[in-house]
Amino acid sequence: MKEKINFGKIISDILLVIFFAIVIVPFIMVIFTSFKSTIEINDMPNRDLIHRILPDNPLDFTNLIQVFTGTAKQLNGVPFYRFIINSFIVTLGSLVPSFILAATAAYGLAKYKFPCRNIIFYLFLGLVMIPMEMISIPLFMTVSKLHMINTYVGMMIPSFISAFGTFLLKESIEPISDSYIEAGRIDGAGEVRIFSSLILPMLSGPIVTFVVIKCTWCWNDFFWPLLVVSTEKMKPVTLGLSRFSTDLFKEYGQLNAAVLLSMLPLLIVFIICNRYIKTGLMGSGIKG
Amino acid sequence: MKTKNKYSLAGFLFVLPSLLYFLFVFLYPLILSFVNSLCRVNLLLGTKDYLGFSNFRNLLSRDYFWDSLCITLKFAVMSVPMLMVVDLFVADKLASMKGRCGKILTTISFLPFIVSMAAAGMVWDWILDPSLGLMNALLGAVGLPQPLWLRSPESALYSTLLITLWIRAPFGIMILMGGIQNVSQDLYEAASLDGATPIQKFFRITVPLINPQLIMVLTLETIFAFRAFDQIYTSTGGGPAGATRTLMIYLVKDLFNSDYGMASALTVMMLIVMFAISLIEQTLLKKKVEY
C-alpha cells in the first residue's frame, strides 16, 4: 500500500520536473543563442549537446548590438530601439486613460446606486467575453476613415478601456466602508475629491496589479497593430520582432537577440512587482 | 430625497465616460460587424450594398473555410483539455508546496505570462528547428526519432500545441492556484481521518470546490483556442501546406485584404460558435456540481 503511493508520487514529481524544464528552457535558449554567431549556429549538427546550448563566446554582443542599432539585415535600417520606443509610447499612452476610465467606472459601480447600474455592469462583463478580433474589421474601417492608420492613437484606441481593470478595481473598492465617503461628505469634500484623495490611496495593491497586467497586454499586443500599422518606423516591438520570422533561412542569433530585447523591459517590471501580479490574478481571476 | 438623487447622478457620471467609450469602440463596431456580414463592403468608396446571406453562402462554399474550420476545431479539441489537465496538475502540486521552494517555483511557472505570443512562436520555432534546434538534439542524444516539428504538415499542428501550452499555462495555473488555496484545510484533514487517498482527496474535494475557477479557465481557454493566431502566425505563418491555417490565420491572410463583407461573415460565425460552445460548457458543468 505504502509503496503504491510513493510510486504515484514519483511519477507526478517527474511530470512536474518535465513541466518546469519546458517552462525554463526557452528562456535559457533565448539568452544563450543571442550570443551565438551565424557560423556557430549552422555548425550545430556537428556538436555535442553541451556545445549546442552554451555559446562559444559568451561575451559576443554582436547580435544584440546589430539588432539594437538596426544594422541587422532584416531590419532594413530601422533600429530595434525605435520599436521599443514605439511600444513604450503606446503602452504608457494607453495606461493612463485606461486607468482613469477603469477606476472611475469601478467607483461608480461599486459605491453608488442608480438606474440601469446592473445592466451597465453586465455590458462591461460582455466586453470581457468579446474577443478583440471580432470587432477588428469595423474598428479598422473607422480608424482608417479617421486617418489614424500608422499613428500611435490608432494603435491605442482599443486599449483605452480595460474591462479587466474595471472588475479588479470594483472588487477592491466594494469592501471599503461607506463611512469614509460619508465622513468626506460631511467635511464638505466633493465627490471627485473623495474619490481621488480618499479612495484611490487605499488601492495601492490593486493599482500595481492593474498597471503591470495592463502593461503586459499592451506591450505584447500583436493582432491590432498588425492591422493598423504598416510603416516600419511606427511598428511596436511585437511587429518589429516578426521581421525575423519571415525569412526562409532565419538568422537565429539575431532573432533571439531581438526576442531578448523585446522582453527585457517587462522582465524587469515583473521582477520588481511579481508578487502583485500573482495575488491580483489569483484573487480576481478576470481577463479582458 | 434630493441629496440621494444628486449622489446617484454623481455615480452615473463616474460611469459615463467608460460607458460612452464602450458603446463607441466596442458595441458599435460589433453591430457593424453583423451589418457588414450582410453587405458588399467597399472601403475606398465607402459604400455598402445589401446582399442578404450571400457572404455566408459564399464562405461556406470555399474549401479553405472548411479546412481551417477543421484545423481550428482540432486545435481546440486538443489544446483545451491538455491545458486544463496541465494547469490543474501543476496548480495542485504548487499549492501543496510549502516555503521558499514553492514560492520560487510559482514565480518561475508564471514567467511565460510576460512573453508575447509572437515572441513565443519565434523562440519555439528556433528550439524546434529540425536540424539546428535543441529539441531534436535532445531527442537524438537519447536515441529517439527526430520529427520535423513545425516544418512538416503532419506534425506542425501538434507542435503549435506545445507553444500554446507554454504561453497559456501560467494564466490558468494562477487562477486555479488561487482557488485551491482558498479551500479550507479542515476538509483535507477530515478526509485524511476517514482514510481518503491523495487521489480521492483531489477528485472529491479539490476539483468540486474550485469548480467556478475551472469553468472560468475552461471558457477562456476555449475562446482563446478559437482565436489562436499570434503564436501560429510567427512560427509557421499558417504553413506548411496550410496545415496550421486556423480560422484567424485564414481571416487575416486570405479574407482581410480582399473582402470585408466575407471577413465580417466569418467573424460573426466565429462569435456565434464561441458563445454557443462556452454556454454549453457552462451549463453542463454548473449542473454537475451541486455540493
Image: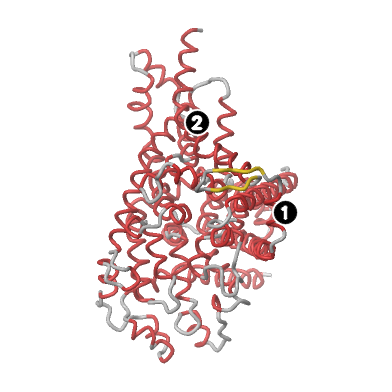
Residue A257 is left or right of residue B214, and the answer is left
Which residue is the site of mark 1? B57
Amino acid type, label 1: Arg
Spot occupied by residue A264 in the image (x, y as percentages of width and height): 33, 61
**Chain that bears disc 1:** B
Above or below for B6 versus A209: above
- Closest to the observer, A74 or B186: A74
- Badge 2 density bin: few <14, some 14–19, many ≥20, Cα 10 Å: many
- The subunit carrying tag 2 is B
Residue A19 in picture, x, y percent from top left = 52, 68
Task: Read off the residue under disc 2.
Answer: B19
- At label 2, the amino acid type is Leu
Tell me: B225 left or right of B10: right
Report which quarter residue B122 is drawn in: bottom left
- Would you identify the image quadrant in which residue B251 lies? bottom right
Q: Say which label, 1 or 2, has the lower sequence index.
A: 2
